[in-house]
Amino acid sequence: MRKLITILTFAIISLSCNKSEKKHSSLSEINTDSLLKKSLKLEFIYRTNKSDVFKIMMNNIEVDELQKKHIHISENVEPSSNDDYIIAKFDPDNLSKQIVISLGNNNEKEVIIKSIIVSYGDKQFNLISPEDLNSNLVFNKFIIRDSTSNVISTKRIQGKLNPTIRLKNSLINQLERE
């Protein structure tokens, strides 16, 4: 009887050790896979004439079939005659095609867009010219835009202020193509 108990004990220990090794090897595979995935980086370079809170947001990131999450990167901005910037980096497991830049909802202001640099892996787009902005961005109704320059003004509509700039899906699709 003792032999049987001893044999069963060793069998159970042996099996549990094998499962532990399998878990460890599958974790290293996951880590290797996540290293191969690409992150997305957005640099917003600007000047503004009023204080506010700017945000770079990635919305509707799928967690699973029932859940979605949103990532908002906020920065308090101050008026300046020099270029300022906000850099947002989104990890490979936190990506969606809904990328928005919010220009704050406290004050009406003027913003000069110096550049918007979007990087994904080794691909990069630098949106500098008014033509780049026209073809790759969507400006909402709270933004008055001079189509020949990179100067925009925000405006209130019926007492509300929510100026946002959205990256077009066509730009994001170009980044994803190998």
Image: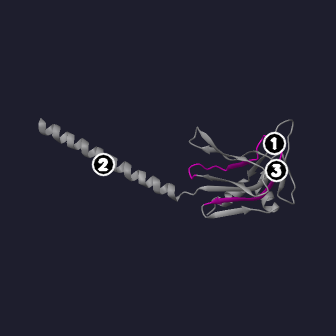
- Point out the stretch of residues depicted in magenta: 91-120
Say which quadrant the C terminus sits in: bottom right
Taking 156 as reference, is 71 left or right? left
Q: Quadrant of residue 121?
A: bottom right
Q: Which amino acid type is shown beneath numbered disc 3?
A: Asn
Closer-to-camera residue (23/54): 54
Q: Say whether disc 3 or disc 1 marks the residue closer to the N-terminus.
A: 3
- The label on residue 107 is 1
Give the answer, above or below, for where 170 lies relative to 159. below
Return the residue at label 3: 49
- The label on residue 45 is none
Rate crowding at label 2 as few (under 14), some (14 to 19) or many (20 or more) other CA atoms within 10 Å: few
Q: Say whether disc 1 or disc 2 marks the residue closer to the N-terminus.
A: 2
Query: Which residue is at 75% across, 48% downward?
Result: 78
Q: Is residue 18 magenta?
A: no
Give the answer, above or below, for where 144 lies relative to 83. above
